[in-house]
Amino acid sequence: MMWLSDSQKVGVAFCSGGGFFLIGGVLLFFDRAMLAMGNILFLIGLTIIIGPSKTAVFFARRSKIQGTLAFFSGLTLIFLRWPLIGFLIELYGILILFGDFLGTILGFARNIPVIGPYVGMLVDRTGLGARRNAELPV
């Protein structure tokens, strides 16, 4: 992580903490407080990593507006004590918003020492990695 500034490293820590809180909230049968804290930490971390203006532009893109509405609607439902339904709606929004990065994430996961080969087999069998660089003109 030499290429990240110090503030971006703090943002990565916030996003990681948010991910752990989200996983904990799901494991604790959709605990509302844990899910809410995970979402808040994730949004703070994302804002610190890419900056406030780029975060606003990311969520306001016309191609991602359905994902943005689903994400924030799910977050609102979690705050209003409907954690299961809110999480499912939010998960749909996350898939729309961050689905483009799935290939990058899976490529990174292939290089993890113990589970990497298993992730690679899963990606190859399901065809999730088949679209890698499909949008490139070359």
Image (cartoon, rainbow, N blue to C red):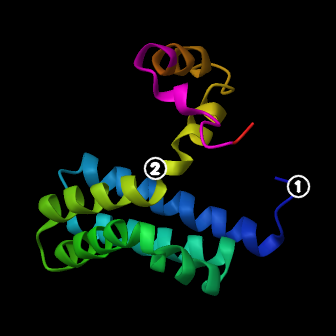
Of mark 2 and mark 1, the one earlier in the sequence is 1
**Residue 9's quadrant in the figure?**
bottom right
Residue 134 is a magenta residue: yes
- Residue 119 image point, x, y percent: 52, 21
- Residue 99 image point, x, y percent: 46, 49
Position of residue 119 relative to residue 15, above or below, is above
The one nearer the camera, 42 or 55, is 55
What's the amino acid at mark 1?
A: Met
- Residue 106 image point, x, y percent: 56, 34
Taking the view exactly as shown, the residue that stands out farthest to the right is: 2
Taking the view exactly as shown, the residue that stands out farthest to the bottom is: 53
Looking at the rendered structure, which numbered label has been put on residue 137? none
What's the amino acid at mark 2?
A: Gly
Q: Give the range drawn in magenta.
A: 124-136
**Which residue: 42% across, 75% down?**
40
Looking at the rendered structure, which numbered label has been put on residue 99? 2
Secondary structure beneath label 2: helix
**Which residue: 57% across, 67% down?**
14
Position of residue 99 relative to residue 104, above or below, is below
- The answer to whether residue 115 is left or right of residue 22 is right
- The answer to whether residue 82 is left or right of residue 105 is left
Secondary structure beneath label 1: loop
Looking at the rendered structure, which numbered label has been put on residue 2? 1
Q: Badges 2 and 1: C-beta atoms under 8 Å apart?
A: no
The one nearer the camera, 37 or 57, is 57
Q: Which quadrant would the C terminus be assigned to in this image? A: top right
The one nearer the camera, 133 or 15, is 133
- Residue 109 image point, x, y percent: 60, 31
Residue 127 is a magenta residue: yes
